[in-house]
Structures are given as structure tokens and as C-alpha cells.
Amino acid sequence: MLLPHLGYVLDPVGRALVTGATGFVGGRLARTLADAGTQVRALVRDRGKASDLEGAGAELHEGDVLDADSLRGAGEGVDVAYYLVHGMGRGSDGADFAERERTAARNFARMAADEGVARVVYLGGLGENPDSQHLRSRAETAEIL
């Protein structure tokens, strides 16, 4: 599929798992992949917020990266998984965002390995502040994945 606004051609892969599919980047990626002929499975926390993705042809898997059990089956038959999840604040359990990011990444990495996902693509971040907790957390997440 030609994507002139991006300046390249996107070759479809068999099946892709997109996390963060109800978010800004994930939603656009899921639709673009589906338009290119990729079978898309969208990992969503709330199926009710993803009807537009389902309408675009995505298969929905309801789950949360913080709940390892809910991820079972998300990666079955998937060739590539896009990890587009980032935490920013404390959770209801009081854990800071960095600990939540580590837990989420470990859960996802374990599921991907157990279910034979060949490739994980992670959206990291750039910045010039080496003291940024957020950027350190993103780097640690990348290492876990």
C-alpha cells in the first residue's frame, strides 16, 4: 500500500498485534496496517471504546498489560507486535509509573515469548535531559522488551 504522506510503501505482514490501539498513535497504526492488508489484532482495555477499530476490520483482544492473565492468547498467530503503551502517573495501587512500566513490559514480553511472537516493535522516546525519569523508564522498558 502506497502511503504518499509518509513517503514509502507499507508491505503488509500476516498478523499484527497493536497495543495502545485506542490511543492516538496506536489507533492510526492499526487502521493503516488494516488498510495495507495486514490482519490486525488490537489489544484494548475497554472493548466499548474500540468499536471503530472493529469496524475497520481489527480483531479485538480485551486485556491490560498490567494483568498478565488477560494477555493470554493476544499473541497467538501474531508475526509482529507493536508496543505503544506508556504510563505517566501513579496507579491505584500506589506504584509509580516506572514500576508500572516495568511490570507491563515484563508481562508483555513474557506473553510474546510464550506465544511465539517473532518481533516486537517499541515506540521509545528521545530527549536531551539525561535525568528525566520518564526517558529512563522508556529506556528500561526497551531493554525488557
Image (cartoon, helix red, strand yellow):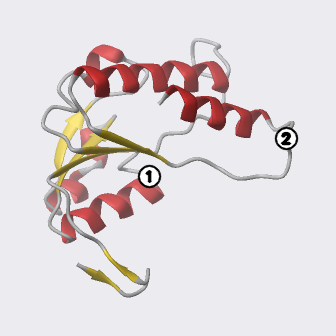
Q: In the displayed structure, does residue 141 sit left or right of residue 48?
A: right
Q: Quadrant of residue 110?
A: top left
**Residue at horizontal 86%, vertical 46%?**
129
Q: In the displayed structure, does residue 92 sit left or right of residue 52?
A: right
Q: Amino acid at mark 1?
A: Gly
Q: Nearer the viewer, mark 2 or mark 1?
A: 2
Q: Position of residue 126 (x, y in %)?
A: 70, 53
Q: Quadrant of residue 44?
A: top left
Q: Amino acid at mark 2?
A: Pro
What secondary structure is marked by label 1?
Answer: loop
Q: Position of residue 95 (x, y in %)?
A: 64, 15
**Residue at horizontal 87%, vertical 36%?**
131
Who comes first in sequence, dot 2 or dot 1?
1
Q: Is residue 95 above or below residue 104?
A: above
Mark 1 Cα shell of 10 Å, populated few (<14), some (14-19), many (≥20):
some
Give the Cα distance between marks 2 and 1: 27 Å
Q: In the displayed structure, does residue 28 sit left or right of residue 71?
A: right
**Residue at horizontal 77%, vertical 33%?**
133
Q: Is residue 35 above or below residue 79?
A: below
Q: Are marks 2 and 1 in contact (CB under 8 Å)?
A: no
Q: Is residue 60 above or below residue 9?
A: above
Q: Nearer the viewer, residue 79 or 103?
A: 79
Residue bearing the label numbered 1? 23
Mark 2 Cα shell of 10 Å, populated few (<14), some (14-19), many (≥20):
few
Residue bearing the label numbered 2? 130
- Checking the image for residue 40, the label placed there is none
